[in-house]
Image: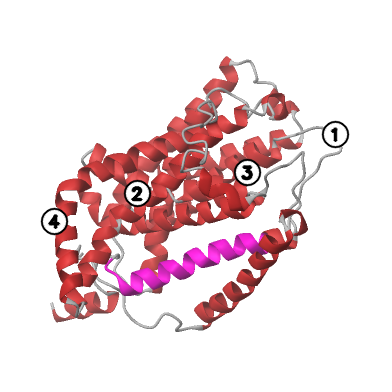
Amino acid sequence: MSDHSVEPVGGPIIFNRFTRFLAMFLGLWILILAYRFATGIGTVSGLTDGYPWGIWIAFDVVTGTALACGGYAIAILCYILNKGKYHPLVRPAILTSALGYSMAALAIIIDVGRWWGIWRIPLGGFPDMGHYNWNSALLEVALCVMAYAGVLWIELGPAFLEKWKATSKSPGLIKFAGAGLKFYDKALIWIIALGVLLPTMHQSSLGSLMLLGGHKLHPLWNTGWIPLLFLISCIGMGYAVVVWESAVSSRVFNRQREDSMLISLSGAMVIVLGLFLLLRFADIIISGKFGLMFSSGMLSVMFWIEMALVAIPMLMLIRARDRAKFITIFRASMLIMLAGALYRFDAYIVAFNPGKNWSYFPTTLELLITFGVIGLEIFLYIFIVKRYPILSGTRATQVREIEGRA
């Protein structure tokens, strides 16, 4: 039994030891951020001229935005491939994406040395209006990430409008919400189109950025196909995150899980994983890098770990009877997320060698800032699903009561 209507989870925000600890940790995180912005990036990070970006970019932005591609991946299924049965997964996926991209934007501000000038990027380099460097892949990433974060919150707008229309005591707000919902009926298709175009552009460009490193990036990762590989892997990570988010939220908030849809979704995961493996090995063989897979020391080990983390979940899900078991899908989704994260970390840090005498390892404060970004995302997710209609399905206790009466 499944109820595809959406409703707020309800209940208090800080209700257990985990959320209380999270709130206290975020208080400490704010103090660390204040120290970073007051004293400069060098006092809290291990970044150098050789390694101008580290974990804040490799994880918070490059990996974080890929993990936030659930909305993008589900939109491809629902609106491009016309698989409407997955529609109940759209709103939770978009919320996860909106929070992930917003946290990535915050991480970029934290990572930029002269953070006070970042507002000039969306304004065309004001006061020199329109003087963009149109040859810059980094500019394209910055503009698309900013734009896509805004588009995601706009896509999520109906959830807020529905809540205001149903519960507000202000006639003006009720009227505004009603007018907004009518606007979405006409404009949503164009918003969705932007929501598919923008991540296609910047996820591939995140791969293009590392081509600028030239010889500094190890040949196993330095390939003209890296933009396509980044794009394909982010779609696989998006599907995996949808499975993971559904499993965790249903457990934490006592909701019925959408097992039939998630089992069906696992078939798409197999296709994406297989395509990634095919392109990865085809590129290496065609470009004559076959021997490097075995002769590059620790980087060869990292490469084969990546490939194993892609191949194992594909084999776990390749048979229909295995995909029928949700626990198998959940375990496979964890491996897929880890595989995509490792591929990005390898490309941005591990396989990147700026030259002799340069080294990088994140400092304690760098790690705490990253954990704070993740903690803020979790806290906001809990707040929004408790207050606004995001999650579909009935409470698991209600399902058991109905089945008992039947």
Visible in this render: residue 338? no
Q: Judge by depth and name the residue closer to the eye, 197 or 133.
A: 133
Residue marked by disc 3:
345
In the image, residue 373 sits, relative to residue 270, either above or below, namely below
Q: Judge by depth and name the residue closer to the eye, 217 or 265.
A: 217
Q: Amino acid at mark 1?
A: Lys
As measured in the structure, the alpha-carbon distance from the residue carrying label 1 to the one carrying label 3 is: 20 Å
The mark that comes first in sequence, 1 or 4, is 4
Numbered disc 3: secondary structure: helix
Query: Left or right: where does residue 51 sit relative to residue 18?
Result: right
> Dot 2: within a 10 Å radius of its alpha carbon, few (fewer than 14), some, or many (20 or more) residues?
some
In the image, residue 371 sits, relative to residue 228, either above or below, namely below
Is mark 2 in CB contact (under 8 Å) with mark 4?
Answer: no
Is mark 3 in CB contact (under 8 Å) with mark 4?
Answer: no
Numbered disc 2: secondary structure: helix
In the image, residue 330 sits, relative to residue 295, either above or below, namely below
Residue marked by disc 4:
182
Residue marked by disc 1:
356
